[in-house]
Image (tube, grey):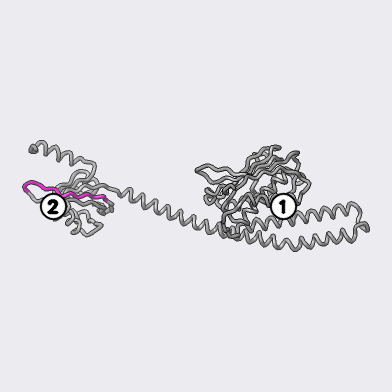
Amino acid sequence: MSTLTADNQTLQAHLLDHAYEPIIAWELDGSIVYWNHAAEELYGFSRAQALGTGIHQLLNSIHPIPLAEILAQVETLTQWSGEVVYHTSAGVTLSIDSRLLLISVPGRAPLILQSDSDNSIYKQAETAMRQVYEELEQRVEERTRDLASANKELESFSYSVSHDLRAPLRSLQGFTRILLLDYAGKTLDERAVDLMHRMTAAVTRMGQLIEDLLKLSQVTRTVIHPQPLDLTAMAAIIFDGLKERDPARAVDIRVEPGITAVADPGLLRAVLENLLGNAWKFTGKTAAPQITVGVTATPDSDTTYFIQDNGAGFDMEFADQLFAPFQRLHRATEFEGTGVGLATVQRIIHRHGGRIWAESSPGHGAKFFFTLGPASKSKKRLPQT
């Protein structure tokens, strides 16, 4: 190996002096023997101030472990690296990634060559981000508590109002029935009888609204108990009930075999009763009504269930109103209903971690899709026998 010439030594010193990072050399007792320009800029001490001064006293160093242990490691392993806190001439605290290397120098005692990297900006950013996250988490927790409290109050209010409205409605319905029975053909003319019938119908409708509102309120309070379910069998039972109530209708019913799900039995039955009941209702004016219950799935998604009919359908322009309570896309004179059923269905689906949506067009039926979250992903079908 060739010996360094004076020119080469001067060149190396010049390059080190203009290095981007602070480079410092000090003896094992801490006395500084080299202090480059980057060290001057970062720490604020001139070379004249630094040379011959103890580095730990000059920068008021705070080490992650005792200095004696660091020096022992340097002497044993010839190197050490870690995060050190230094203070500038202006009193600014810096977080520094410091690397120490023990260097043998001909003709003198070994020196410690130190190179530093200022990560104070990153530390400050990290601290600021942590504060932001903590504040956001606190705000989210506060908003969540407020929302939960508001929802609880709203549910309690809805339930109480619905409950309290039942008694006067029953009384009004009873009085109306008494008037119709006791005074029909006596003192009431046809106009009065018609008005009484309308009053009775209105009371009945309001009673149904209250019942549906209670069901909607109860959905959010019901504790969910998921378990494996046979949706094919459940759908068949529901269709049997629809046929019993409307035996004159001939509906082409198609239910795929072996459809299963993991869900709360009572709540999922309410979902199917609403969706199948709607399909039955909205095919009431169709010449050859058909209702299909099926399931589709893709490898990377939840199982998707669907109920399809060829009934009245609806305009997709108003699809955002489908699941809003008391919103109806058909006139009450065309199809009966309160507009609460689909809102109840959506709440049940959401509580299971799933989602529900629909596709339709006027006069061409509707197809409702829903998922039940990850629990049903691998529970597509029962074994075929």
Residue occupied by mark 1: 241
Q: Where in the figure is residue 212, as x and y percent of width and height?
A: 69, 55
Q: Residue at x 29, y 48 (%)?
A: 119
Q: Nearer the viewer, residue 309 or 238?
A: 238
Does the magenta run of residues contain 102? Answer: yes
Q: Residue at x 56, y 58 (%)?
A: 148
* Residue at the left extreme, as displayed: 107
Q: Secondary structure at mark 1?
A: helix
Q: Which residues are magenta?
A: 96-107
Numbered label attached to residue 266: none
Name the spot of residue 106 as percent of width and height, x first.
Answer: 7, 46
As drawn, 207 above or below 113: below
> Badge 1, how many Cα within 10 Å: few under 14, some, many 20+?
some
Task: Place residue 180 in its image quadrant.
Answer: bottom right
The foreground one among 205 and 301 is 301
Confirm whether the magenta stretch covers residue 79. Answer: no
**Dot 2 corresponds to which residue?**
27
Q: Can residue 322 be seen in the rendering of this structure?
A: yes
Residue 3 located left or right of residue 290? left
Q: Could you tell me residue 228's position as x and y percent? A: 57, 54
The numbered mark, 2 or 1, whose residue comes first in the sequence reads 2
- Mostly what secondary structure, the magenta segment? strand
Instruction: Decide: few, some or many residues near mark 2? Use Cα within 10 Å; few <14, some 14-19, many ≥20.
Output: some
In this view, the mark in front (2 or 1): 1
**How far apart in space, not on screen, are marks 2 and 1 (Cα)?**
94 Å
Please give the name of the residue rendered at 63% of the width and 40% of the height, measured from the top-left corner.
Answer: 359
Q: Position of residue 79 (x, y in %)?
A: 19, 51
- The quarter of the picture where the N terminus appears is top left
